[in-house]
Image: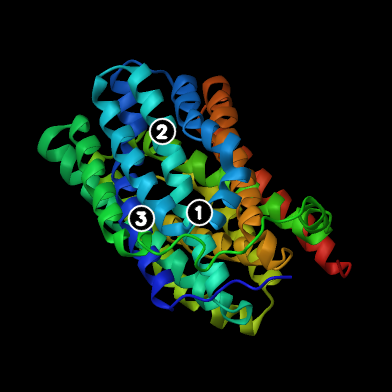
Amino acid sequence: MPEPTRTPAGSPRTANVAVFLFLSGSQAMIPFVPLYARSLGAHPAAIGLILGGYHVLPLLVAIPLGGIIQRWGAGRSMLAACLCGAAGALVMLGGGLPYLVFGLLVFGVASLTVVSSGQVETLLNVPAEAWDRAIGMFAFSTSLALIVGPLAGATLVRLGGYALIFPGTAVLVLAAGASILRLAQRPRGEALLSRPPSRRATLSALGQPAVALVLLCSMTSESALSFWSGFFPLLLAGKGFTPEVIALYFSLRGVATASIRPLLGVFTRLASRARVLIVSLALMALALALMPVLTRPTEYAAVVILFGIAAGFIFPLTLALVSVGFSPEAMGTGVGIRQFVTRVGQLLGPVLLGLVTQATGLTAAFVTSAVIVGGTAAVYARFRARGG
C-alpha cells in the first residue's frame, strides 16, 4: 500500500485558517436565513424545505468529492470552493425565494468542499496517534466561526437589514480563498496518494458494525444541529427575543463548543472515544428536550452552553471513530462517505421536523429531535456494552 507523502505541519494549520474564515461567513448568514425567508413570505414548512435544500446538492456529490479532493489537492479544492461560495452568497441578493434556494445550493457545495478539504489535509498529514489533538484543533477552528460569524451577521443586520449579510458573507469567503493561495500553489500530487481507493477497501470499512453505528450517530446528531440552527431562532423570536439576542445565543453556543474542543485529547485519555461520544449524545438530547419549555434568558444561556459542549465533542469524535476504519488509500473516500451521511441528517432534520412543526408546533419538534438523538446514544451504548 503506498504511503502519502508528508507535507509540512503548517499545511493543516493553513487549512484551518481558511475553514475558520469561510465558516465565519457561513455563520454570519445561516442563522438569519429563516428570518429572511419569513420576510419573503415563507411559512414554517417552506423554511424547512429551503434549509433542507441547502444540503441536497452536497448530498449528491459528497462521496466522489472526497476522492477528488484527495487526488486534486486540498488547496486547489478550497480555492475553487471559496470563489463559488462567494458567487452563491451574492446570488441570494436577487430578492426572491428562488434566488435564495439556488444560492444556498451553490453555497452548500462550496461549504462541503472547504470542510472536507480541511479534514483530508489533517488526516493525511498527521499521524493517526495524534488525531485527537489535530482533529480537536480543526474542530476548534470551526467552532471559532460559530462565535465570530453570528455576531458579524447581527452587526450587518443592524446596519443594513437582512440583505446586507449576503455581501458580508461573500467578503469573508473571499478572504478564506486569499488565505489558502499558498497551499493552492502546491504541486498537484504532493501529499496525495498515487492511486484511488479500491471499492473492496471502502466496502470492507463500511461493513464494520462499529463504523456503521458511528455514522448513524453522526447522522442523527447533525440532523438535530441542522434543525436547531433553523428553528431555534423561530422559537426565540416567538418568545419576544430580538435578532441581536438570538445572535448572542448562537455565539454563546460557539464559545462553549470552542472552549471544549482543544480538551478532546484529555477526555479521550480519561475515557474511550466511544464513552465520551455516548455521554455527549445524551447531553445533546437533554438540552433539546429542555429548550421549548424554558422562559428565562439565563435558563436558555445554561442550556445553550450544555448543547454547545455536547456538539463540540460529537463532531471530532465521529470523524476520528469513522476514520480509523479506513486505510490511508481510502481516507478521502471515507471523509466523503461521512460527509454524505451527515448531509443526509442535515437534510432530514429541517425538512421532517419542519413538517412536525407545521403540524404540531415547535415544542413537539424539539422533543422529537431529542428522542432521536437519545435513542441513537442508547443503541450505540448497548452495542459497545456487548463488546462491539
Any part of residue 240 in sight: no
- The front one of 293 and 222 is 222
- Looking at the figure, which quarter contains the N terminus? bottom right
Q: Position of residue 212 (x, y in %)?
A: 77, 53
Identify the element where label 2 is drawn: helix
Q: Which mark is residue 146?
A: 3
Q: Determine which residue is flagged by label 2.
A: 106
Among the two numbered marks 3 and 2 on one chain, the one whose residue lies closer to the N terminus: 2
Of all residues, the one furthest to the right in this rendering is 386
Q: How many marks?
A: 3
Q: Nearer the viewer, mark 2 or mark 1?
A: 1
Q: Position of residue 205 (x, y in %)?
A: 78, 58
The residue type indicated by label 3 comes to Leu
The quadrant where residue 20 appears: bottom left
- Looking at the figure, which quarter contains the C terminus? bottom right
The residue type indicated by label 2 comes to Val
Q: Determine which residue is flagged by label 1.
A: 72
What is the distance, in whole Å, between disc 3 and disc 2 at their CAs?
21 Å
Residue at 55%, 28% (x, y): give it: 351
Q: Residue 357, relative to residue 187: is it above or below?
A: above
